[in-house]
Amino acid sequence: MNRRPPRPKRGALAVCATPRADKSIIRSMLKRQDLHSFPHTSPWTLIGLLIVFVMSACQSNLTPSPSATPIPTSTIGLRTAEPLPSSTATQAPILSISPTASPSPTTNCLRLGGTLQKETISSEYVGELNFQIYLPPCYQADPEKRYPVLYLLHGLSYDEEQWLQIGLVQEMDSLIVNGIIAPFLVVLPHEARFNPPQTSGFDDALMLELVPWIDEQFQTLSEKPFRALGGLSRGAAWAVHIGFTHHQQFASIGAHSLPIFEADSGNLNAWLTSIPHADLPTFYIDIGRSDQEVQSALEFANQLDAHHIPHEWHLFNDGHTQTYWFNHLQGYLKWYARNW
């Protein structure tokens, strides 16, 4: 990178004010004006020489001096070149750049952020399944582009708005606009009835109805490496349950503040034994030290350890609170998008 030369210090400015060439001229004129350098002559001779000198100086003032050749001005890089002063001397050709038509202003779709849509589909298993879907910035700009999909499940006594309340949309927009994560879709299903997994039907509605509908209606990448599932609290229990029962559908499972379903506790060992390890998703488990479910999450992580199943285990401060999930939301999203 080219750097500007350092500015002179204030104290040095007076020393450098007169260039060396000017000083040289001044010294030469002093020598010319030194009368003692002339040879010894009579006063009348000196007076005559002085008259001749004055007359020649006056004549030189009346003779017009030739015009100085102007220095050509560079116009490279200017859209419209300024005309140079007229002169009889030959001048350098002027580079004239005609202005090009500016393209019509286009909106930077990244800066507009993503959009959120509310949808409802009829379900054989739960009657109606309401959900919201986050479409990333510039989703509408290229109808041929396909995106990964993340499904996020809410906690007990909440609905899909829980993820919005802890800042999902703002965090997604920020991470995408700043190039930290690749854009992807986020689907937020609403579990209306909090029944045990054996009688709920929510997992069937999600996997047999919602996921195919999303892939049909939106620009998704439907292969396993581009689909992830996560949840907080009860949603984390669902994520683990579905991660095993539909392990061929998801590459990543996020279990945030995890309480394992009681009915699943006895199934974990069978799942971990019967499912080929290469077919299982990668798990991310996190919980706060003061969370009442910390032992449940720890036991699940220990079982993954015992069966050598790839996973991440994070024990943070804080408890089972909205503040905790808000503080870790960015880390969750970056983990889901790590391979996208």
Image: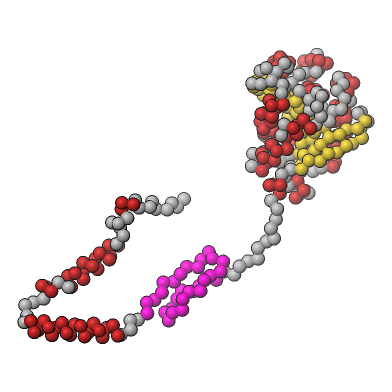
> How many numbered dots are placed on residues in this image?
0
Residue 159 screen position, x and y as percent = 81, 29
Query: In which image quadrant can residue 255 be found?
Result: top right
- Render colour scheme: secondary structure
Name the magenta segment's main secondary structure. loop
Q: Is residue 292 among the parts visible in the rendering?
A: yes
At 77% from the left and 30% from the top, the residue drawn is 162
What residue range appears in magenta? 67-96
At 66% from the left and 30% from the top, the residue drawn is 331
Residue 254 screen position, x and y as percent = 73, 27
Along the horizontal axis of the image, is 281 left or right of 47? right
Q: Is residue 174 above or below residue 267?
A: below
Would residue 80 be counted in the magenta stretch? yes
Along the horizontal axis of the image, is 326 left or right of 45? right
Residue 112 screen position, x and y as percent = 71, 47
Would residue 294 be counted in the magenta stretch? no
Query: In which image quadrant can residue 260 be found?
Result: top right
The one of 304 and 117 positioned closer to us in this rendering = 117
At 28% from the left and 82% from the top, the residue drawn is 61
Image quadrant containing the C terminus: top right
Along the horizontal axis of the image, is 182 left or right of 210? left
At 88% from the left and 30% from the top, the residue drawn is 205
The one of 110 and 159 positioned closer to us in this rendering = 159
The one of 95 and 319 positioned closer to us in this rendering = 319
Q: Is residue 223 among the parts visible in the rendering?
A: no
Residue 87 screen position, x and y as percent = 44, 79
Q: Is residue 235 above or below residue 139?
A: above
